[in-house]
Amino acid sequence: MFHPSPICGGRARSASATPSRKRTTPHIITLTSGKGGVGKSNFTANVALQLRQFRRRVMIFDADLGLANIDIILGISPEYNISHVLSGEKKLSEILVKGPGGIKILPASSGVTEMTNITDQQKIMLLQQMEELESEFDFLLIDTGAGIASNVIYFALAAQTVIVVLTPEPTSLADGYALIKVLSTNYRQNAFKILVNEVTGEHEALQVFKNLLTVTDRFLNVSLDLIGFLPRDSRIRDAVRAQRPFVELYPNTTASKCIKRIAKRILMMENDPMKSDLGLLWRNILPAAVA
């Protein structure tokens, strides 16, 4: 099912005024992909900074637990990471680090194979400590690994909004569809936002989205919403090399304007009442372990 949405172009409705905050718990957004290398973490970092520029309190949870990326993209070197929490050495509140613009980051570890499949008990410990932080943020962005591993599925289910990042490559489209299929068929997750990266413009983004929609409409009972696109731009890669967000380094580019528009669309979902209790939400996806 297609929900038409304005993306980067003149047809988008004006969102000059950002909605007032009403929530006392964060809106949880999981950003994921079927395939690696599609620019998901870079998108996460930049949309987080843009939300922060809209005066929202934002935390990024780098949930690619064994292959950290967010800290590299943002040019920070955390002393501690999620592995120290899961081992019991630190609490989540003790490993939080400040990134550009005042966003907060829960850093992942890198090259630690044990982090790729954390246990149910470890997941429970994470959610318990996350509940202690929930009143401090308006948005929690969970940047997962790629594919259909158990960690990816868990964090996709632990969100009000799931954004699947694609590129025009056929492999990205196929793997994105596979991820959506697993989440919808096995776990009844039936609503997805789609972000198409590295396109020549809106026309190509719409074509990629329609190609995915053709397959999901035929085989799955899901709702897809095109939340936006990012253009292919060498300055995005330049910003990654400089370890700075491109919305900060190149604020007047088309890519930065697209991020701003996407962030405004995210703000429209801010007060979604569904799944507003973080602890209840996460416990619902681990009923056996919690019992």
Image (spheres, rainbow, N blue to C red):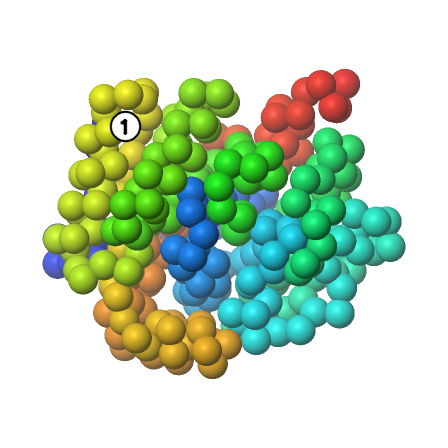
Q: Quadrant of the C terminus?
A: top right
| Residue 256 in sight from this viewpoint | yes
Residue 257 in view (yes/no): no
Residue 178 image point, x, y percent? 39, 33
The answer to whether residue 162 is left or right of residue 152 is left
User: Between 76 and 12, which is closer to the camera in this rendering?
Assistant: 76
Residue drawn at point x = 61 percent, y = 60 percent: 68
Could you tell me the amino acid type at mark 1?
A: Thr
**Residue at x 39%, y 43% (from the top left corner):** 164
Find residue 102 and report its horizontal and vertical position in percent.
57, 69
> Mark 1 sits on what residue?
216
**How many numbered callouts?**
1
Q: Is residue 151 left or right of residue 271?
A: right
Residue at left offset 17%, top offset 60%: 201
36 versus 184 height, above or below: below
Q: Considering the numbered disc 1 on the image, is that residue within a helix, a strand or a loop? A: helix
User: Percent from the top left, x then y, of residue 24?
Assistant: 58, 44
Q: Position of residue 204 (x, y in %)?
A: 16, 53
